Image (tube, rainbow, N blue to C red):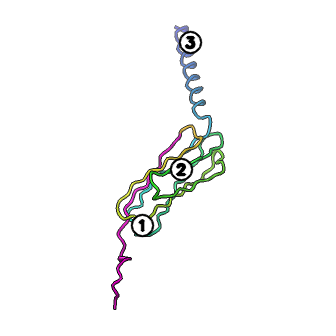
Amino acid sequence: MKTIILYIAMTFGVLLGVNTLFAQEAVKGPQISFEKEVYDFGKLEYNGDGRCQFVFKNTGNEPLWISQVQGSCACAIAEWPKEPILPGKKSKIIIRYDTRRVGPTTKAFTVTSNAVNGPRVLKIIGEVQPPKEDPFDSTPTN
């Protein structure tokens, strides 16, 4: 009986050790973790402020480098840090959407980095309202 208990304990110990080994191996390198990956503007005013930011943290154990943030169209511009983000530090990606494009929108941005859990895709959604006045209306008002 003691032999069986000892065998079970040793087997459990070996399995626990293997799981720990794989878990430690999985976290080597930089990892990128976003606070949120979808930003909902809701209703945007025509020609209004179309900026948003995606805050992220390097949850890995090596410096994180973002090499590119590529949008699904030319209607938005992304800005990202060019310097390395050290382990445990936060930074942000800023997206500027062209709010002169009336109507609903959903745009995706692929974040390319050296993160072991990358690339990642960020999304913006919203609806740009029509202008309050027609900027091309040349009718004089009295």
The percent position of residue 99, horizontal first and vertical second, equals 43, 65
**Distance from the alpha carbon under mark 2 to that under mark 3:** 55 Å
Is 49 above or below relative to 135? above
Q: Amino acid at mark 1?
A: Arg
Q: Is residue 132 left or right of residue 84?
A: left
Q: Residue at x 60, y 30 (%)?
A: 25
As drawn, 117 above or below 98 = above
Between the C-alphas of marks 3 and 1, the distance is: 72 Å
Residue behind mark 2: 69
- Mark 2–mark 3 CB contact (< 8 Å): no
Q: Nearer the viewer, mark 3 or mark 1?
A: 1
Residue 96 on the magenta span: no
Q: Which mark is residue 6?
A: 3
Residue at 54%, 53% (x, y): give it. Answer: 55
Residue assigned mark 1: 100
**Quarter occupied by residue 13:** top right
Magenta-highlighted stretch: main secondary structure?
Answer: loop
